[in-house]
Amino acid sequence: MQPNLTEEERNCLAGYLAGWADTVDALRMRQYIQHGSVTTYEHCMRVAAISFWLNRRLNLGCDEASLVRGAFLHDFYLYDWHLPHREMGLHGFTHPATALANAEARYALNDRERNVIRSHMWPLTLLTPPRCREAAVVCVADKLSSTTETLWERRRPMVPAAQTAGRH
Ligand SMILES: [Fe+2]
Ligand SMILES: [Fe+2]
């Protein structure tokens, strides 16, 4: 799923992410596969674009900068979840906290951006629900993006289903 943004909207999106999506650590997300053949970096950019598109088309009234930046950092966990990481626990449950800790260490986040990252796996992470409209939008956008990437963008060998359950 790629949202149909105008040139002005694409420029606006890029403006919000200048200094955020072009850092050395942000670019590390290009090394990791998220779903199918899609890298974590591509996935995060796509979730940011879908969130931006939903907010504009449905007039949801989100703070656009927080929406886009939180969406971009929502999977900033910086490891390959296909490999065993026992110290991390179950990826589906733990990676929002890992992504938030990584983002806090590198960016000056506001409360909306923190909640976007921390709550994006809800309802799997039952105790950390979205508490602002930006987080609710990213929660939906992530599921839309993850579903289409998993179903229609598999050009590499499939990861066994048991390893992918609940992982966004
Ligand atoms: Fe995720
Ligand atoms: Fe995600």
Image (cartoon, rainbow, N blue to C red):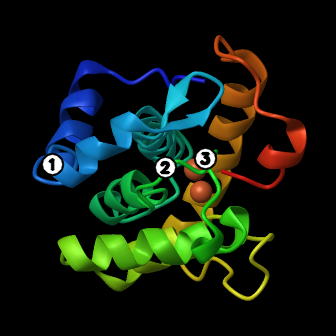
What type is the residue that disc 3 sits on? Ala
Which corner quadrant of the image does residue 42 belong to? top left
Residue 95 seen in this snapshot: yes
Left or right of 24? Residue 45 is right
| Position of residue 11 in the picture relative to residue 163 (left or right) | left
* Mark 1 C-beta to ligand 2 under 8 Å: no
Q: Secondary structure at mark 1?
A: helix
Residue 119 position in % (x across, y down): 60, 74
Residue that badge 1 annotates: 24
Q: Which mark is residue 160?
A: none
Coordinates of residue 160 in the picture (x, y in percent): 84, 35
Task: Describe the element under mark 2 as helix, strand or loop.
Answer: helix
Callout 1 touching callout 3 (CB < 8 Å) = no
In the image, taking residue 97 as reference, residue 167 lies left or right, namely right
Which residue, given by chain and number where applicable, does mark 3 sit on?
A: 141
Residue 127 image point, x, y percent: 74, 88
User: How much space separates mark 2 and mark 1, taking CA atoms?
Assistant: 29 Å
- In which quarter of the view is residue 145 placed? top right
Quadrant assignment for the N terminus: top right
Q: Are marks 2 and 3 in contact (CB under 8 Å)?
A: no
- Of all residues, the one furthest to the left in this rendering is 19
Instruction: Residue under label 2, please give it.
Output: 55
Q: Residue flagged by tag 2: what amino acid is it?
A: Asn
Kind of residue at badge 1? Val
Secondary element at image label 3: helix
Q: CA distance from mark 1 to mark 3?
A: 25 Å
Query: Which of the two discs, 1 and 3, sits closer to the camera?
Result: 1
Of 73 and 32, the residue lying toward us = 32
Decide if residue 57 is on the left or right side of residue 94.
left
Image point 78% across, 23% down: which residue?
151
| Label 1: few (<14), some (14–19) or many (≥20) C-alpha neighbours in 10 Å | few
The spot of residue 159 in percent (x, y) is 76, 32
